[in-house]
Image (tube, rainbow, N blue to C red):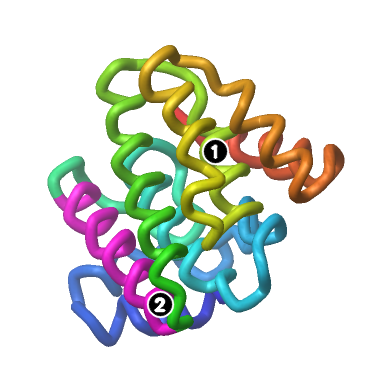
């Protein structure tokens, strides 16, 4: 996963390649992909790396400033969606587009719930409508509990707890 993300960033732009951390400083911890089907791992972790570039401490990249961080994060979002689209699952692409949109809303509102949103989306990726009501509870009422419950039902308490703990440690 990590080599593919780094290799593709270098191939895409010398600017992105220049933002890679030295190899000894990179962290190779999958956060939410362990909750998903294996075929989604690369795309999901690419999108999550973009999220971390925007809002946390990235595992592979260390942008020099906010402007380039924003551009790099957007590149990683787009590249991750392309990877998911290559799996041939339109619902998974839609689920991840909703994830990115709702996470942006939460950040703009300085609201909580992104961890549960990531966990449920990863665990139920490609399920489409099954995520609509739990996402609506977060979007409209700030209630992340339905997403947390859905993630735990799909992936199990221990797996979700590991992912959420790793996620909390990466955010600013």
Provide the major secondary structure of the magenta segment: helix
Q: Quadrant of residue 94?
A: bottom left
Q: Quadrant of residue 13?
A: bottom left
Q: Quadrant of residue 110?
A: top left
In depth, the one of 83 and 22 nearer the eye is 83
In depth, the one of 4 and 38 nearer the eye is 38
Residue drawn where x is 45% and y is 74% of the image: 89
Instruction: Determine which of the numbered discs, if any, sits on residue 83 in the image.
Output: 2
In depth, the one of 131 and 165 nearer the eye is 131
Q: Is residue 10 above or below residue 70?
A: below
Q: Give the extent of the magenta segment.
A: 68-86
Other-residue count near label 1 (Cα within 10 Å), few / some / many at <14 / 14–19 / ≥20:
some
Nearer the observer: mark 2 or 1; the answer is 2
Q: Position of residue 9 (x, y in %)?
A: 32, 76
Q: Secondary structure at mark 1?
A: loop
- Magenta-drawn stretch contains 79: yes
Q: Position of residue 32 (x, y in %)?
A: 62, 52
Residue 135 appears left or right of 104: right
Q: Tell which circle, 2 or 1, labels the residue nearer the N-terminal end.
A: 2
Q: Is residue 23 above or below residue 3?
A: above
Q: Position of residue 26 (x, y in %)?
A: 54, 62
Residue 100 appears left or right of 25: left
Q: Secondary structure at mark 2?
A: helix
Q: Position of residue 46 (x, y in %)?
A: 44, 65
Instruction: Report which residue position mark 1 lands on.
Output: 170
Residue drawn where x is 27% and y is 65% of the image: 78
Specify the quadrant that holds the N terminus: bottom right
Residue sticking out furthest to the top: 141
């Amino acid at each position: 996963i990590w080599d593919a993300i780094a290799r593709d960033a270098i191939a895409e732009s010398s600017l992105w390649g220049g933002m890679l951390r030295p190899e000894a400083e990179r962290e190779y911890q999958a956060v939410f992909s362990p909750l998903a089907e294996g075929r989604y791992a690369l795309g999901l972790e690419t999108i999550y790396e973009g999220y971390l570039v925007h809002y946390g401490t990235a595992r592979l990249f260390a942008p020099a400033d906010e402007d380039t961080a924003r551009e790099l994060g957007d590149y990683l979002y787009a590249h991750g969606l392309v990877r998911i689209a290559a799996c041939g699952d339109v619902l998974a692409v839609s689920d991840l587009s909703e994830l990115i949109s709702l996470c942006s809303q939460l950040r703009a509102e300085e609201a909580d719930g992104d961890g549960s949103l990531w966990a449920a989306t990863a665990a139920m990726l490609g399920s489409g409508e099954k995520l609509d009501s739990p996402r609506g509870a977060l979007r409209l009422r700030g209630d992340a509990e339905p997403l947390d419950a859905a993630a735990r039902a799909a992936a199990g308490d221990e797996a979700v707890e590991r992912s959420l703990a790793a996620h909390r440690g990466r955010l600013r």
